């Protein structure tokens, strides 16, 4: 039944963390495993969608029918997403994009100086990929994620409106939930509707997310 709705639909998914280089051997990163984004991509493929996956550095493999573009930094992810998003029906931004990156990615390894007891690393803001897509491609149905440790629903609601997204998936993280785990509990939110899913595997959450998108947008 759901396959009837997704058959031939074009879906772009971003997944995984980004790594923001300090120098050739060091980076700032986060604990995203990429599992949620990969589960969405695989579930949509099984439903007959044409899936493109832009992935940060993760230890996961994707089905050969999924077109996969690997990236490292937020800036590279923005470039790949921008290149792929034209002609898509839906963009789901499941990647944990670093909000900031080191101001300078040094081309030689940074050395500690003799007697040095501290160091300051200056960070600059990364582009907001999902907000950029929502603003520039009003015809694409844009879905974001909000991984929060507290006041999950209120923060997610605010984030959806501020970023101009069609939908946001609120996701409690920490205390063994969300990042690096196999199970999840999403609350799906549009301007008009909110649906709290029962906790389950990431592929089951992906299935219910794709069903909700089909119900609300095509
Ligand atoms: O603001 P926050 O990082 O909590 O927002 C999370 C949502 O925004 C996710 O969908 C994430 O993929 C997206 N995001 C983005 N670019 C950023 C930061 C977050 O696309 N620089």
Image (cartoon, rainbow, N blue to C red):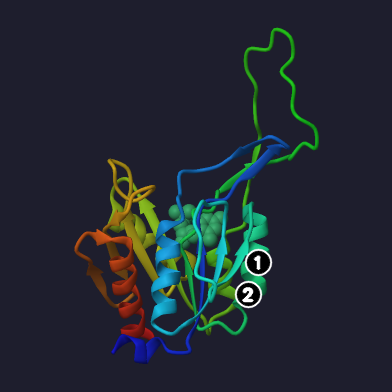
Q: Residue 169: horizontal and vertical position, in percent?
A: 35, 64
Q: Residues within 10 Å of mark 2 (few under 14, many from 20)?
A: some
Asked which secondary structure carries label 1, the reply is: helix
Quarter holding the C terminus is: bottom left
Which residue in the rendered view is the most extreme toward the right?
Answer: 107
**Figure quadrant of residue 124:** top right
Q: Residue 216: horizontal and vertical position, in percent?
A: 33, 84
- Residue corresponding to mark 2: 84
Which residue in the rendered view is the most extreme toward the front?
Answer: 64
Q: How many marks?
A: 2
Q: Residue at x 35, y 55 (%)?
A: 155
Q: Residue at x 30, y 53 (%)?
A: 152
Mark 1 and mark 2: span between their CA atoms?
A: 6 Å
Quarter holding the N terminus is: bottom left
Of residues 218 and 65, the one nearer the viewer is 65
In the image: residue 216, left or right of residue 101? left
Q: Residue 164: horizontal and vertical position, in percent?
A: 47, 70
Q: Residue 10: horizontal and vertical position, in percent?
A: 51, 83
Question: In the rendering, which numbered label is found on residue 80?
Answer: 1
**Are the residues flagged by discs 1 and 2 in contact, CB closer than 8 Å?**
yes
């Amino acid at each position: 039944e759901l396959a009837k709705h997704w058959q031939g639909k074009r879906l772009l998914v971003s997944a995984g963390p980004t790594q923001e280089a300090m120098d050739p051997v060091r980076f700032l990163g986060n604990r995203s495993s990429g599992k949620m984004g990969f589960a969405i991509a695989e579930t949509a493929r099984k439903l007959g969608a044409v899936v493109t996956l832009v992935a940060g550095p993760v230890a996961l493999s994707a089905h050969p029918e999924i077109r996969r573009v690997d990236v490292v930094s937020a800036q590279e992810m923005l470039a790949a997403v921008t290149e792929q998003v034209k002609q898509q029906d839906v963009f789901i931004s499941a990647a944990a994009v670093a909000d900031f990156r080191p101001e300078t990615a040094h081309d030689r390894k940074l050395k500690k100086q003799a007697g040095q007891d501290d160091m300051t690393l200056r960070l600059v803001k990364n582009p907001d990929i999902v907000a950029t897509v929502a603003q520039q491609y009003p015809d694409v149905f844009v879905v974001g994620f909000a991984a929060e440790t507290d006041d999950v629903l209120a923060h997610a609601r605010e984030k959806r409106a501020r970023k101009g997204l069609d939908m946001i998936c609120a996701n409690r993280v920490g205390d063994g939930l969300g990042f690096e785990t196999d199970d999840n509990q999403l609350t799906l939110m549009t301007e008009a509707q909110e649906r709290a899913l029962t906790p389950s595997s990431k592929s089951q959450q992906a299935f219910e997310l794709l069903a909700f998108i089909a119900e609300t947008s095509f």
